[in-house]
Amino acid sequence: MTRATLAEIRSFFAKLMASASGSADPRLERIFESVPREAFMGPGPWQIRAGHSYVETPSDDPAYLYQNVLVALDAERHINNGEPFLHAQWLGRAAPQAGETVTHIGAGTGYYSAILSMLVLPDGTVTAFEIDKKLADRARENLKPFRNLSLICGSAVSSPLPPSDLIYVNAGVQEPPLHWIEALKQGGRLIFPLCPTQRAGVAMVITRKSGGLEAKPIMPVWFIPCIGASETANGGKEPDIAKAWKAKAVHLTRSRAPDNTALITGQHIWFSSAPIER
């Protein structure tokens, strides 16, 4: 038997990603096939996350990257290029569309930023934030071919965000900063990991609808903490992740005080078990 070519391996990976997304959008398969993962991982061999440690690939053959694996960007700090199937599911849920404005928080070296930029072509734009300078420098170089994307080396927690149709967050937060929610356009989606400190959490989608902010928990997740947004503020308690699974809406505390439907109460927002009004 002859070995599959890299093009064939990448094509099969793209089919897996499209299937894992749960979406009927045909662009997902085409885009995952056209964006080479190895272009964003640095020179091989690579460190692949397995359990609580890493295993080095036998060589720099890119075929090793086209699996559902975490690839180390900085193994010492456990910073990885995220699990492909997880991102496929997130993209299926978030459904980036042509012409939309996307903000990507936690770009790493840019692989998923590139995917997002392709999904909003021809007229959409992506603003990607990466707080780590070394990773941001690598991302800036990797993302040069993607003309509808701008990279900011800095904190999205302390910086204003552009008005966004989609805010895609790849770092665990204790409570999404208020200005992230305020940046959502009508119909805009904020997808993020509600992950207190270093514990596992739940991926949540907040959508701005005419009746208010709808909340939908979608899957268990673990992400590295988002600097500045993963700590308990003002002596408060960490969110109860078990309660987060029952969330149906988000309210701003300045506009509406928490009531008996409150599941998680933060400094600026609270999650409710009652759905928004239609």
Image: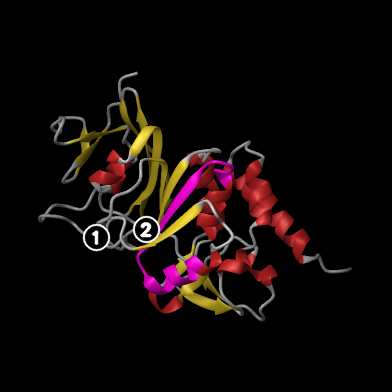
For the point 16% across and 30% down, which residue is it? 260
Residue 275's label in the rendered image is: none
**Badge count:** 2
What whole-number distance in Å separates the C-alpha atoms at marks 1 and 2?
11 Å
Q: Mark 2 belongs to which amino acid?
A: Ala
Look at the image and tell me whether residue 266 can be seen. yes
Residue ID for mark 1: 228
Residue 171's label in the rendered image is: 2
Look at the image and tell me whether residue 50 can be seen. no
Q: Which residues are magenta?
A: 119-140
User: Which image quarter holds the N terminus?
Assistant: bottom right
Say which of 103 and 225 sits in front: 103
Label 1, secondary structure: give it.
loop
Residue 182 spot, x, y in % from top left:
28, 39
Of mark 1 and mark 2, the one earlier in the sequence is: 2
Whether residue 163 is in magenta: the answer is no
The figure's colour scheme reads: secondary structure
Residue 154 spot, x, y in % from top left:
33, 63
For the point 52% across and 56% down, which residue is it? 112
Q: Mark 1 belongs to which amino acid?
A: Gly
Q: Quadrant of residue 242?
A: top left
Say which of 190 and 203 sits in front: 190
User: Which image quarter holds the C terminus?
Assistant: top left
Residue 140 spot, x, y in % from top left:
48, 66
Say which of 154 and 48 sits in front: 154
